[in-house]
Image (cartoon, rainbow, N blue to C red):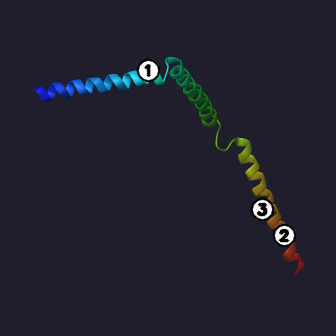
């Protein structure tokens, strides 16, 4: 029983020292500023993620551009084939 009481006193003293050190080292104002900075960063990142999620990966305009380029290459290949056949 004596050992348990002594252990409780030592733990309480250590807890008190740690708490006092934290009070002396980090003021409430510093902690609040750090928390506000973190909150601002999280809000900024959340906004950026929301913007990225709203953008479609491939929009209709991009698909039309890809199809136009593919059609142009296909037309060029057909024309080159016809030119090679006529040249023989």
Q: Locate residue 80 relative to residue 61 in the image: left or right.
A: right
The residue indicated by pointer 1 is: 23
Q: CA distance from mark 1 to mark 2?
A: 81 Å
The residue indicated by pointer 2 is: 80
Outermost residue toward the right? Answer: 87
Q: Position of residue 27 (x, y in %)?
A: 50, 20
Q: Quadrant of residue 40?
A: top right
Q: Give SS at disc 2.
A: helix
Q: CA distance from mark 2 to mark 3?
A: 10 Å
- Closer to the chain start, of discs 3 and 1, is 1
Please state which of the two labelled residues, at mark 3 or mark 1, is closer to the viewer. Answer: 1
Count of marks placed on residues: 3
> What quarter of the picture does the C terminus occupy?
bottom right
> What quarter of the picture does the N terminus occupy?
top left
Give the class, few, some or many, for how many residues have Cα within 10 Å of label 3's Cα (few <14, many ≥20).
few
Give the class, few, some or many, for how many residues have Cα within 10 Å of label 2's Cα (few <14, many ≥20).
few
Outermost residue toward the top? Answer: 29
Q: Which mark identifies residue 74?
A: 3
Q: Position of residue 69 (x, y in %)?
A: 78, 55
Mark 2 touching mark 3, by CB under 8 A? no
Q: Give SS at disc 1.
A: helix
At x 20%, y 28%, the residue is 7
At x 74%, y 42%, the residue is 61
């Amino acid at each position: 029983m004596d050992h348990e009481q002594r252990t409780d006193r030592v733990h309480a003293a250590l807890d008190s020292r740690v708490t006092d050190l934290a009070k002396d080292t980090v003021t409430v104002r510093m902690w609040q500023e750090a928390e506000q900075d973190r909150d601002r960063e999280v809000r900024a990142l959340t906004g950026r993620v929301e913007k990225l999620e709203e953008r479609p990966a491939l929009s209709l305009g991009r698909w039309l551009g890809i199809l136009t380029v593919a059609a142009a290459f296909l037309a060029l290949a057909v024309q080159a084939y016809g030119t090679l056949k006529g040249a023989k």
